[in-house]
Amino acid sequence: MKILFLNASPHGETSHGYRLALEMIGMLQERGAPEASRIEVIERDLAAAPLPPIARDYARAITSRTPDPRMFDLSEQLIEEIETTDMLIVNTPMHNFTVPAALKLWIDYVLRIHRTFASTPDGKVGLMRDRPGFVIVGSGGFHTGERARQPDFLTPYLRYALGSIGIHSVHFLALQGLVMGDEAVGSALNLARAELGRLDPFADLANRSGFTESTSLSAGEPLMQ
């Protein structure tokens, strides 16, 4: 079993979303014991090791009938990371109402016509198999619920982008109000844990992998260090 963990937060390991993602991964490893040794996590830090911008040679290859396959080396690497994993976890901040540039570049490389999606009269059709996806969205303010004071373009955009390559089983976990003090951070994390408990996020993955033990995050559980 493999999990692809994408981090797009410039705060890295100190990000609240990053630590929540580790908590989710730890939960699955505990559920799978003693088979936990079979779980592999592929972590790609898009903020600490940013991808190169899309350049002219790549753009030409995308639209060419006879492209130089070497132009797709990085794209292939990123796509294969998805293909070889059973679950996708993304930790991302909301920057100016939508995804940060680091995550947008990853999307630009993995959404590739004739490779991860087909263009049809009815729109893009994903060519990759579906798998559970979890997107942790960190924001200083509020973009959903009664306290929302700004629009949310991140959620519909990322849902559509992932759906375009075939990943439709995507759940979003909002960590809001993160600049409003420790109490607000704790409340946001507890709400996210409660949502995970309702979703039972690993049920399908566990069943397909032979894991049967029932485990859930409780609001009082500490984060993994």
Image (tube, rainbow, N blue to C red):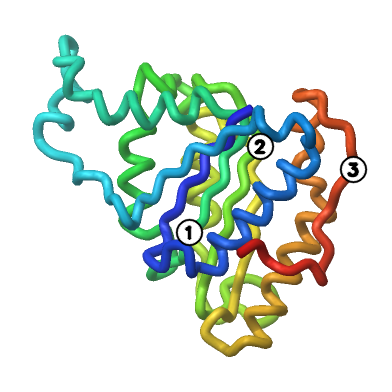
Tag 3, which secondary structure?
loop
Pointer 2: what residue?
A: 132
How crowded pointer 3 is (Cα within 10 Å; few <14, some 14-19, many 20+) is rated as few
Place of residue 130 in the rendered image (x, y in percent of width and height, measured from the top left): 62, 27
Which sits in the foreground, 214 or 52?
Answer: 214
Amino acid beneath label 1: Thr
Q: Tag on residue 92? A: 1
* Near-viewer residue (5 or 135): 5
Q: Residue 162, position in %: x, y?
A: 51, 38
Sequence-earlier tag: 1 or 3: 1
Image location of residue 139, percent across then percent down: 51, 72
The image quarter containing residue 222 is bottom right
* Mark 2 or 1, nearer chain start: 1
Residue 180 placement: quadrant: bottom right
Q: Nearer the viewer, mark 2 or mark 3?
A: 3
Which dot marks residue 214? Answer: 3
Q: Nearer the viewer, residue 74 or 115?
A: 74
